[in-house]
Image (cartoon, rainbow, N blue to C red):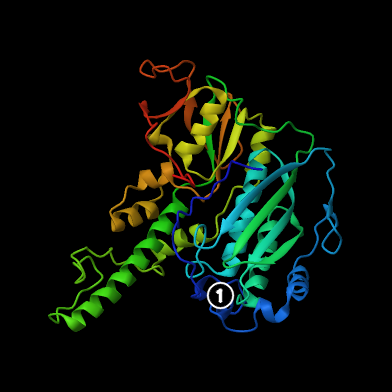
């Protein structure tokens, strides 16, 4: 079981939603098929009819020797070793149907597992998918979810080899990804060395910014509705959703943002569909990376996992860490710290690696810090940790499901 990728969506304790998100449906799909209760349901089709509807949308890739239809699938492993990782996604905890389409959820579910595989330096080969679905779930939602899985897998040459289906009160997804090491040793977390350079592959802060924008928009909508209801029965004073005080208790509304604003749309899309730097995992492995992991809990937390496993101290230099202008713009609109999003936000599924000085890095990699040769003077008895600009960050946790 993979423990490297707890989700960072941070939608804990949010009720499951049935509203559609037509702006994020896959090209050529119907906007009403995102969970609004319209059209035939999985109960209408039945278990085996649903399996047929899903599997006919999932062509087998070259590594799947035997796909859905038997008691088990058969997947090739030329290396003789298999990399395996698994994740759970729960509706209302890791995704919301009013924020993400079925296609989005499929892309994201595949991406977060495929990213774990490439973080080991391996090539993804196949996914196995468990789906728990309410009886009222539209068939089209399940079909578009399958399309999302298929299209994300195609980016790395993998495919869905099989799975299982059951009924449940809300949507529950269990995704297992397989990979092939192609003769290389796996790149682990416990082998960083003093003097290594810390390298970032991919982008950070985008998904966290998108999540913050979605939350702000949801809060604005809720405040507007509450204020309108209050004003209809109270003094007639209209409340707005642009930062004024709501009429229901004096709490200021969230800043007004429009998700279709070009400054924000790509950030929201990054939350819905992450873009892991798939090729760079095996490329960094081939370049001799000493340690590597997928950034899903946040850079500080995940680099902290490497530091703990390797018993080393890491120092990040924020002058080397890119903070894109659109993240800064969104942070300014919401009164947030853009660097905080970059350092602690997850769900972009970037990779962070430790390499020897002088390593020829693949294009798309950026040096953002170093592994120290000795423990900082003020470290006390701790043998590992993460510094930012020389300052200890042990009080900056990332995502934790049970915190």
Residue 252 appears in view: yes
Residue drawn 47% across and 15% down? 374
Left or right of 371 on screen, residue 147: right
**Closer-to-camera residue (195/64):** 64
187 vs 33: above or below: above
Residue tagged by mark 1?
Answer: 35
Left or right of 139 on screen, residue 399: left
Q: Quadrant of residue 42?
A: bottom right
The image quadrant where one finds the C terminus is: top left
Q: What is the tally of numbered marks visible in this picture?
A: 1
Residue drawn 60% across and 67% down? 103
**Closer-to-camera residue (161/323):** 161
**Closer-to-camera residue (394/44):** 44
155 vs 338: above or below: below
Give the x, y percent position of residue 362.
61, 38
Give the x, y percent position of residue 160.
75, 59
């Amino acid at each position: 079981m993979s423990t490297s990728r707890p989700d960072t969506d941070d939608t804990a304790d949010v009720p499951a939603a049935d509203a559609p998100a037509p702006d994020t449906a896959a090209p050529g799909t119907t906007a009403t098929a995102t969970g609004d209760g319209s059209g035939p349901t999985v109960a209408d089709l039945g278990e085996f009819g649903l399996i047929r509807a899903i599997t006919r949308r999932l062509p087998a890739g070259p590594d799947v020797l035997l796909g859905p239809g038997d008691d088990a699938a058969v997947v090739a492993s030329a290396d003789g070793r298999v990399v395996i990782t698994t994740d759970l996604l729960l509706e209302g905890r890791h995704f919301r149907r009013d924020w993400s389409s079925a296609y989005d959820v499929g892309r994201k579910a595949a991406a977060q597992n495929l990213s774990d595989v490439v973080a080991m330096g391996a090539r993804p080969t196949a996914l196995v998918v468990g789906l728990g679905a309410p009886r009222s779930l539209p068939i089209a939602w399940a079909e578009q979810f399958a399309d999302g899985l298929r299209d994300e897998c195609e980016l790395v040459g993998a495919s869905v080899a099989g799975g299982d289906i059951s009924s449940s009160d809300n949507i529950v997804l269990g995704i297992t990804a397989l990979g092939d090491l192609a003769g290389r040793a796996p790149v682990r977390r416990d082998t960083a060395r003093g003097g290594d350079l810390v390298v970032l592959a991919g982008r950070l802060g985008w998904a966290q910014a998108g999540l913050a924008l979605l939350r702000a928009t949801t809060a604005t909508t809720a405040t507007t509705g509450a204020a309108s209801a209050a004003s209809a029965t109270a003094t007639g004073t209209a409340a707005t959703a642009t930062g004024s005080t709501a009429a229901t208790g004096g709490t200021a509304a969230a800043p007004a943002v429009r998700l279709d604003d070009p400054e924000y749309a790509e950030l929201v899309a990054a939350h819905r569909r992450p873009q892991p730097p798939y090729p760079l995992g095996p490329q960094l492995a081939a370049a001799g990376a000493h340690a590597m992991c997928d950034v899903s809990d946040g850079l500080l937390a995940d680099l902290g996992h490497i530091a703990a496993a390797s018993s080393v101290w890491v120092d990040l230099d924020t002058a080397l860490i890119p903070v894109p202008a659109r993240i800064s713009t969104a942070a300014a609109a919401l009164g947030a710290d853009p660097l905080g999003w970059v350092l602690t936000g997850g769900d972009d599924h970037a990779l962070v690696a430790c390499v020897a000085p002088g390593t020829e890095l693949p294009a798309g990699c950026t040096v953002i810090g170093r592994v120290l040769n000795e423990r900082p003077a003020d470290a006390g008895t701790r043998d590992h940790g993460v510094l930012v600009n020389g300052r200890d960050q042990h009080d900056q946790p990332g995502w934790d499901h049970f915190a």
